[in-house]
Amino acid sequence: MIISVIDGMGGGIGSQIIERLRDELPSYFEIYALGTNSQATSNMLKSKANKGATGENAIIVSAKKANVIIAPASVAIPNSMMGEITKDIATAITDSEALKILIPIMPENFKLVGLEQKPMVLLIKDAVDLIKKEFNL
């Protein structure tokens, strides 16, 4: 079972997600840290991901192998994260057959309606709970 955690900028959200996944999921789940830049990947690897890779091609290739992709919702929007999300990254993620669990963090000029405002720690908890429910854990 492969869970790909995708993040950019400094990888802070991805790091928090990986820490929570490590705390709550069995060890046979492989967690891939996929950063849009090396700093994001490095910080996520410090949170005990099994593997890490950086950049557009790594994300495109790994999205095909993933059973679950968990990331900020902005990974599905080309040019978000200050341009770190390319059109090809967004397409690879949205086209992947993996279950996609997206944390509602959006660029400033995007607004999602109908979502409950929650602190990041609770959003990450909800995302991990979804994975546990999906795999009957």
Image: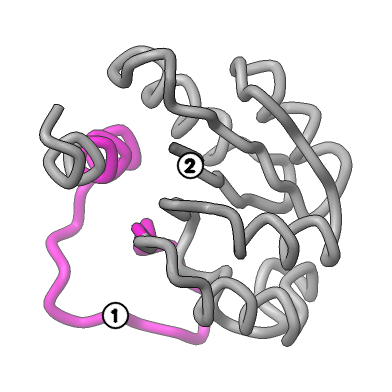
Residue carrying label 1: 112
**Quarter of image, res 62:** bottom right
Q: Amino acid at mark 2?
A: Ile
Nearest to the observer: residue 7 or residue 112: 7
Task: Name the secondary structure under disc 1.
Answer: loop
Q: Is residue 102 magenta?
A: yes
In the rendered image, which quarter is residue 45 located in?
Answer: top right
Q: Residue at x 75, y 82 (%)?
A: 88
Q: Position of residue 39 (x, y in %)?
A: 84, 37
Question: In front here: 49 or 17?
Answer: 49
Left or right, 81 with reference to 119: right
- Mark 2 = which residue? 3
Q: Which residues are magenta?
A: 101-128
Residue 108 in view, yes or no: no
Q: Are marks 1 and 2 in contact (CB under 8 Å)?
A: no
Nearer to the camera, 64 or 112: 64
- Looking at the rendered structure, the kind of residue marked 1 is Leu
Give the residue drawn at x 27%, y 45%: 127
**7 left or right of 10 in image:** left
Magenta stretch holds residue 87: no
Please tell me how crowded label 2 is: few (under 14), some (14-19), or many (20+) other residues with Cα within 10 Å: many
Callout 2: helix, strand or loop?
strand
- Could you say where residue 95 lies in the image, as x and y percent from the top left? 52, 81
Q: Which quadrant is the N terminus positioned in?
A: top left
